[in-house]
């Protein structure tokens, strides 16, 4: 069967659309074997209805990954060694409720990795089709033999109802959770072509009455990796479980490092108004998205957050000849860490006076930039983020350390190993690598 990868680039450019709407999903995997939608013209817009990530796919044995992301989109003109800028124009929740919590595993119901290689311990069927029967932790049943088949349990979980209009949420008690669990689709509002079970059916309610803010963002968004892998493992921490694994996605550490694009970031500032720059590791980029969260602090400490359905709209621009290894983020101005916020006019005047007082002739023109780092631990991820910053900017590694210390920040995105490294970078450097205009646009800089 001919795919877009077999079609000449000139033909793809001619047929490219300014808008591509996506309503099909990847059943937990992403990579070169995944058919792409499109082609999308450079500067065009992708609109996708995204199903919840994590718990729904986790309790659906057919899935070979922990998310259910949108079908990737081929972007005309994007070639290996380029990058694409994703301007997140819309990140709108549609779910009215969800459930999440800390996970534990059921031994005997998976081979090596419960996210990837599930099986029925009763009949031995691998990745069986399944259905929901009733409410509670035994609700997921194997279509082959009827046995309870869920490979996961909550060690502590909650059901949470959402008010997106007023940006607040509230966890509910067991009786309400049971009610929602009997009619999960009425509150999860999972897109029609999604294949996951709703986690509301498990109705686990260990925390009741906890009110929280809502601030939706995307936990998994980016470009297709250069090797097939579970979508939830497209990062340096979860991806480590693929190294020499006993299932079909096994790969070497070297292959993982070269192939992954770190789309699974769980970075709470990847939200409406942010600009994300992603590596292109297959021709056409393969832009995909999913795992919207209703909220999360700095660090997905529990392993999972409030995964919801939503509608996402991104504008895509190709950045030629920008060979990056992982995502670069231009956060919303109000999401920047305090030490990496551009100076106000008043502050700039004070700095100019300070320079005059001591005879300093130049004051650096700069802008904030954030590099995502991932690895087996937070320390490893931090080193990766710092090294990526040095490699892309050409600034000495030790200078990046200093800049991140006095004019930036290191923040946790996820345990065990995703961080964001933010610092003030000279505009001359950003201009040289082709990111200066994006920085000026995002932060209203007129220098």
Image (cartoon, grey):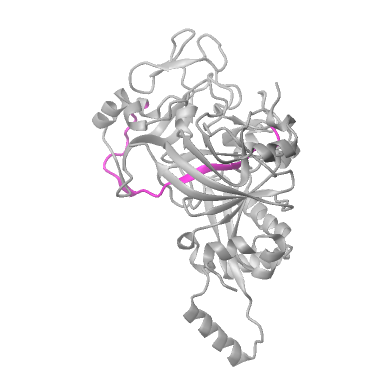
Left or right of 345 on screen, residue 75: right
Q: Point out residue 127 in the picture as x, y percentages from the top left corner.
A: 55, 18
Q: Is residue 284 above or below residue 201?
A: below
Q: Point out residue 287 in the picture as x, y percentages from the top left corner.
A: 60, 40
At x 64%, y 91%, the residue is: 359
Q: Nearer the viewer, residue 66 or 6?
A: 6
Q: Is residue 65 above or below residue 358?
A: above
Q: Which quadrant, please, contains the N terminus? A: top right
**Can residue 210 be found in the magenta stretch?**
yes
Residue farthest to the front, as pictured? 14
**Can residue 396 be found in the magenta stretch?**
no
Question: Which region shows up in magenta?
Answer: 202-227
At x 36%, y 16%, the residue is: 133
Quarter of the image for residue 220 reads: top right
Quarter of the image for residue 175 reads: top left
Q: Is residue 334 above or below residue 247?
A: below
At x 54%, y 62%, the residue is: 442
Q: Is residue 314 above or below residue 107?
A: below
Q: Nearer the viewer, residue 247 or 19?
A: 19
Q: Point out residue 366 in the picture as x, y percentages from the top left corner.
A: 61, 71
User: Is residue 253 visible from the viewing direction of this image?
Assistant: no
């Amino acid at each position: 069967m001919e795919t877009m990868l077999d079609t000449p680039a000139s033909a793809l450019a001619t047929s490219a659309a300014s808008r591509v709407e996506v309503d099909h999903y990847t059943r937990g995997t992403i990579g070169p074997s995944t058919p792409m939608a499109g082609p999308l013209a450079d500067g065009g817009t992708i609109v996708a209805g995204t199903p919840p990530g994590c718990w729904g796919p986790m309790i659906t044995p057919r899935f070979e990954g922990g998310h259910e992301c949108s079908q990737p989109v081929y972007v005309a003109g994007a070639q290996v060694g380029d990058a694409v800028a994703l301007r997140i124009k819309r990140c709108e929740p549609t779910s009215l409720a969800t459930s999440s919590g800390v996970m534990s595993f059921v031994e005997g119901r998976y081979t090596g990795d419960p996210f990837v290689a599930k099986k029925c311990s009763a009949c031995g069927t691998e990745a069986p089709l399944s259905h929901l029967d009733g409410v509670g932790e035994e609700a997921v049943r194997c279509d082959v033999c009827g046995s309870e088949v869920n490979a996961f349990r909550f060690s502590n979980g909650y059901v949470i109802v959402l008010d997106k209009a007023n940006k607040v949420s509230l966890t509910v008690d067991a009786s309400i959770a049971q009610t929602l669990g009997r009619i999960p689709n009425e509150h999860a509002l999972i897109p029609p072509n999604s294949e996951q079970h709703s986690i509301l059916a498990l109705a686990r309610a260990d925390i009741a009455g906890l009110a929280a803010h809502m601030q939706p963002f995307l936990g998994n968004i980016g470009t297709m990796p250069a090797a097939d892998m579970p979508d939830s493992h497209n990062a340096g921490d979860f991806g480590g479980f693929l190294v020499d694994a006993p299932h079909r996605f096994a790969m070497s550490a070297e292959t993982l490092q070269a192939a992954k694009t770190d789309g699974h970031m769980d970075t709470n500032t990847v939200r409406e108004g942010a600009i994300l720059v992603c590596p292109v590791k297959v021709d056409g980029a393969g832009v995909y998205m999913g795992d919207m969260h209703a909220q999360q602090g700095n660090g997905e400490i529990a392993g999972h957050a409030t995964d919801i359905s939503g509608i996402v709209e991104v504008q895509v621009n190709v950045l030629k000849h920008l060979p990056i290894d992982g995502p670069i983020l231009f956060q919303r101005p109000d999401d920047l860490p305090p030490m990496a916020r551009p100076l106000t006019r008043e502050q700039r005047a004070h700095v100019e006076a300070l320079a005059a007082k001591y005879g300093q002739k130049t004051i650096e023109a700069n802008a904030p930039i954030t590099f995502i780092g991932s690895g087996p631990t937070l320390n490893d991820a931090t080193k990766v983020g710092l090294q990526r910053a040095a490699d892309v900017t050409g600034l000495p590694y030790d200078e990046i350390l200093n800049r991140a210390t006095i004019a930036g920040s290191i923040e946790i995105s996820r345990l065990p190993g995703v961080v964001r490294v933010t610092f003030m970078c000279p505009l001359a450097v950003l201009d040289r690598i082709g990111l200066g205009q994006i920085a000026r646009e995002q932060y209203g800089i007129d220098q």
